[in-house]
Amino acid sequence: MGRLANMNRPAAVEIAYECMRFLITHNPTNATLNKFTEELKKFHVNTLVRVCDATYDKAPVEKEGIHVVDWPFDDGAPPPTQIVDDWLKLLNTKFREEPGCCIAVHCVAGLGRVCAQCPSRETENLCTPVDFPGLFPRAPVLVALALIESGMKYEDAVQFIRQKRRGAFNSKQLLYLEKYRPKMRLRFKDTNGHNCCVQ
């Protein structure tokens, strides 16, 4: 399993839509924390959401002025309602108070795709990918929820994220996103009565 755990360390990807900016990134170790923190600063991240159990000391990240929030939930599963509510409240606050900021989110998993036919079970997205327990990232689901809550259709949100992060969702997560009913918590009326994103 050690080989599988290290097989996909994808680069951080920025997802920007309207006034929202997210950075979906990998889970660092204490040994890679300095480089990780520099990357967060490069993207002007002010908040980091960890949706996995803590595997590194958050103090060095917070020392750089980046607030770290821990909201772990099961790998490959949709987030619990309380985490969704807390996530959307955080976005509402951050994007209003600090326009142009970026929120980073990460979990332990890699790309979440393995090949059903290859003996090594590794894939470069050239083979037929299949669900493999323990490899599906949780971070893209939260970003998809933000896009849906801002008015994007779920299919468009999934495609938008997959353009930058292939294999970002498993079938259980896709079903959750399909059935999710937004309350448009990240949409508001501007002074002229027109819909707009968090401002």
Image (tube, rainbow, N blue to C red):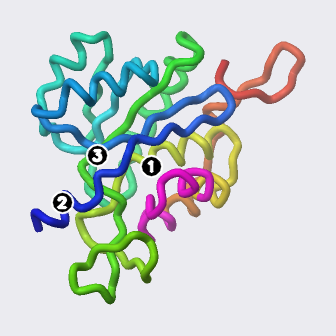
Query: Would you call the spot at circle 3 few (<14 residues within 10 Å), some (14-19), or many (20 or more)?
Result: many
Residue at horizontal 76%, vertical 27%?
196
Residue at horizontal 28%, vertical 74%?
122
User: Closest to the observer: 18 or 81?
Assistant: 18
Residue with the mark numbered 3: 107
Where residue 178 appears, x then y in whole percent?
Answer: 58, 63
| Residue 37, placed above or below residue 26 | above
Per the rendered image, the range of residues in magenta is 159-175
The three-letter code of the residue at mark 1 reads Pro
Among the two numbered marks 2 and 1 on one chain, the one whose residue lies closer to the N terminus: 2
Residue with the mark numbered 2: 5
Residue with the mark numbered 1: 140
| Residue 64, placed above or below residue 111 | above
Which quadrant would residue 167 be assigned to in this image? bottom left
Among the two numbered marks 1 and 3 on one chain, the one whose residue lies closer to the N terminus: 3
User: Closest to the observer: 178 or 12?
Assistant: 12
User: Could you tell me how far apart the alpha carbons at marks 2 and 3 are, in whole angstroms?
Assistant: 12 Å
